[in-house]
Amino acid sequence: MIDATALPDIGYTTIALGLIVLGMFHVAYASYQWNRKYKLPPRVPGIPILGNSLQVPAVQQGPWAKDLAAKYGEMFTCKFGASTWVFLNSSRVVTDLLERRAGIYSSRPPFPMTQDVMSRGGRIVLMPYGDRWRLVRRVMHNILSGRNQDIFQPFQDAESKQLCWDYLHNPERWFSANGRYANSVIMSVVFGRRSQLDDKDVEELFETVELFLEQQQPGVNLVDAFPSKEIAQMDEITKLFVFGSLMEAGSDTSRVTLGQIIAGAITYPDWVQRARDQLDSVCGSNAERLPNSEDRARLPYITAIVKEGFRWRPNIAEIGAPTVLIKDDEYEGYRFPKGTVFTWNAWAIALSPEEYEQPERFWPERFLNDDLENALKGHWAFGPGMLALLSPFACLFFPSPLSQAIGRRVCAGWKVGETNVWIAIARLLYCFDFHEVPGKPIDTMRIPQLAGGAPPFPARVSVRSPAHAELIRRDCEAAVKIHY
Ligand code: HEM
C-alpha cells in the first residue's frame, strides 16, 4: 500500500528543486545573453549586491575617483546597488559621449530620496528628460542668459562693493562674506531682497527652499516680474522649485569658487603679483578706483584667473553629475545598455598631467589663449554640453540619434556664475592681501564644500594699504546702505 500522505511532500520538494534549477539556469542564461550583447569598461571589484557602494567616501569623492582613473585608464565601471556607473576619465571620452552624443546621454537616473521624496520631482538639476525638464530649462534659460544677463550686472556691482566693505570691517569673516555676496546677487534678482552677513536665511537655504517663497518681498523681483507663458503653464510645486533651484544652484557655486581662488592665491602666490600689475595698470597703483565690469577687455588676466579657479580643484561636482543613457549604444568596442549611468570624473581630469601641464599648480597663464573669453572651454566645471550650446549647427557635424537641442545639460547659470566671480575677485585682488596662517598650511586637495559656518580652510586677510582702505570707505559705503 502507498502511504498517500507522503505523496504531496515528495511532489513539493521535487517541484521546489526543479524551480531552483530552472531559476539558476535562467539567471545563467540571462547573464550569458547579457554578456554576449553588452560589454562594459573594466569593472572595479566590489562585493555581492552592494557592489562598490561601501568604497565611496560620503563626501569629497574626487581623490577616490582620481586614484581609480589612474589605475583603470580612460573609463571604468562601478556598481552601486542595482545601478551601473561608467566613469569617463578624459576630456576625449567626455566630449565623444556626453557632448557629441548628448541627445541620448543626458537624462538623469532616478533619485528616489532627493528628487522624488524631498523635491516632489521638482529640482531641475535632478530631472530626467521630458516635457517638465524642457519647460523648466526654458524658463531658467530666459532668466539666466542673453538680455537678462544685464539684470544681474548692477546687483553684482553693488554686492561686490559690500563684499569689499565686509572684508575691510570683518576680515576674519571672509568666508561668510563670500557666502553673503553670492547669495545676495541671486536673491536680489529673484526675490528683490538682499542678504546680510551671517544671514540666518542664507544658513538655512539648503534646509528649505519654501522659506524663500514665504519671505519674498513684493515689488521688483523676478518672481513677480515673470508673467511669461511658460510660468503660467507651471503648477505651484514646479514654480517653487524653479526659484528655489535658482537660489540653491546660484549661491553655493559662486561662493565655493571664490574660496578656491583665495586658496590658490595663498598656496601659489606668484600669480597674484602678476594680477596686481595688470589691475594697477588699469585702476592705478595707489588705489585710484575700483575695477568694474567695463574693464574686462583690459583685464584678461582676471578672466584667466576665474577660469583657472573653475578648473583647479573642481569641488562643486568632484565626480561630475550623473546622467543616464536612454538607449543602447556602442563606443570603441564597448556596448552600453540603456539605463547605464555615466559621469565625467571631474577631479581626475582636472588633475591629470595628460590634460594639463603642472595640473596641481594654480596657473592662470594656461588660459591666456584664443578661447579666453569662452568661459566653458578648457575645463568641465559647468558640465558637458558646450558643443550643443555654442553651435546651433553642431548637430550637422556631430549627428546624434536624437536632436542635439535637447542634449544641453550644461549649467544653465554659467554666465551669471562667471561674471559673479569675475567682478568679486577683481575687486578683492585689487584691495586685499591673502596669507597663510602661520603653522596651518592649506590642504588644497581636501577643502570641504560645506564647513558648517567655519572657514573651509585657514586664511588671513588684510587690506593692501591705507589708500585701499580709504577707497573702500569712499566707494562702497553707499552700496552697503541700499535697502529694498
Ligand atoms: C559659479 C559657478 C557654477 C558652477 C561651477 C556650476 C556648475 C554646475 C554643474 C556642474 C551643473 C550640472 C551640469 C550637468 O549636469 O552636466 C550645473 C547645473 C545647473 N546650474 Fe550651475 N554652476 C555654477 C553657477 C550657477 C548659477 C549662478 C546658477 C543660477 C543662478 C546655476 C544654475 C544651474 C542650473 C539651473 C542647473 C541645472 C541645469 C539642468 O539640469 O538642466 N549655476 N551647474
Image: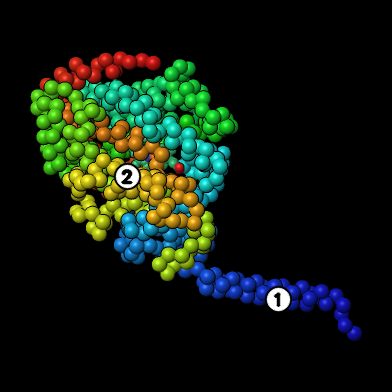
Residue for point 88% across, 83% down: 2
Query: Where residue 289 sits: x, y (%)?
Result: 16, 22
The residue at 24%/43% (across/down) is 372
Residue at the far bottom in the pictured view: 1
Residue 376 is tagged as 2
Above or below — where is 398 with respect to 286? below
Residue shown at 48% from the left, 34% from the top: 139
Residue 374 located left or right of residue 209: left
| Relative depth, front residue between 241 and 404 | 404
Q: Considering the image in quadrants, where does the N terminus appear? A: bottom right
How far from the left and from the top, in percent, is residue 423? 25, 30
The front one of 64 and 279 is 279
Dot 2 crowding, Cα within 10 Å, few <14, some 14–19, many 20+:
many
Closer to the N terminus: mark 2 or mark 1? Answer: 1
Quadrant in the picture for residue 116: top right
**SS at circle 1:** helix
- In the figure, is residue 321 to the left or right of 435? right
Residue named by callout 1? 18
Q: Is residue 165 visible?
A: yes
Query: In what quadrant does ligand 1 lie?
Result: top left
- Amino acid, disc 2: Leu
Up the image or down, 214 lies above or below 322; here it is: above
Q: Residue at x 29, y 22 (%)?
A: 158
